Image (cartoon, helix red, strand yellow):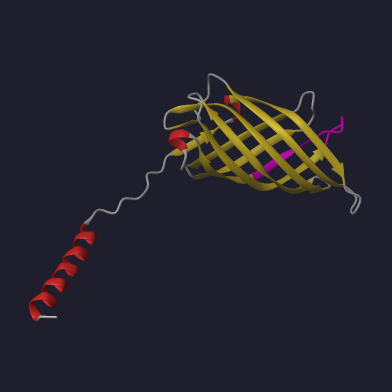
Amino acid sequence: MPEIQRISVAALSVAVILFGLSLPIQAQQRYPIESQSEWYTSKYTKQHIIEASDIAGHQIRIFELHRVSNEKTRMAFSGTKVRESWVWGYSDSISGAGKNWGYGTWTLEDGNRINFEYAGTSQSQPAENGASVGTYHGTARITGGTGKFKGVRGTLVDLVEFNTDPAGGYNRASSKGEY
């Protein structure tokens, strides 16, 4: 290779590298998100409890929870409020303490959905009517969505107070995070 061509290739390579380094590095914009229990009503729509016989007080539970936002809600993604959510979860506890995990979907006012998964631990006590009353601490990971939210990602920290009574139970979650 002639000397001039080697210098030209080397000069071009250096120019490309310097140009690439001079471009501004842009971090992905993060947005805060928050949910408060007074912004919605919730209801357990399905629950199944299995008493495991390996250890006294060992229960496996699956459930479906529906939350509907009210006029107070400020939970929104890119200015679009959350209309409702569905949560499908599992718990595995011994004498009221154990792990919880599951999946959920927020449906926005424009019809788009945002999906999440969560995991954490809970502690509860039996109520007089046989339901469990307690708290859950955990995190939720936003895993994607539909439409303009297809690639959305994020995390939230959750604190939930719950009562599993099918007739008058509640699930009051407060969450903070970003997407």
Q: Residue furthest front?
A: 1
Is 56 placed above or below 109 here? below
x 55%, y 29%: residue: 107
Q: Quadrant of the N terminus?
A: bottom left
- Give the left or right position of residue 28, taking residue 70 as reference: left
- Give the left or right position of residue 117, taking residue 63 as reference: left
Q: Residue furthest top?
A: 71
Is 127 placed above or below 22 here? above
- Segment tinted magenta in the rendering: 126-137
x then y, percent, for residue 63:
74, 36
Indicate whether residue 179 is drawn in magenta.
no
x 60%, y 30%: residue: 85
In this view, the residue in front, 170 or 103, is 103
Indicate whether residue 134 is drawn in magenta.
yes
Q: Residue furthest left?
A: 4
x then y, percent, for residue 77:
46, 33
Q: Quadrant of residue 117?
A: top right
Count of residue discs: 0
x 50%, y 23%: residue: 109
x then y, percent, for residue 99:
72, 49
x then y, percent, for residue 104:
62, 37
In this view, the residue in front, 58 or 83, is 83
In this view, the residue in front, 80 or 148, is 148
- Give the left or right position of residue 25, taking residue 47 as reference: left
Q: Quadrant of residue 47?
A: top right
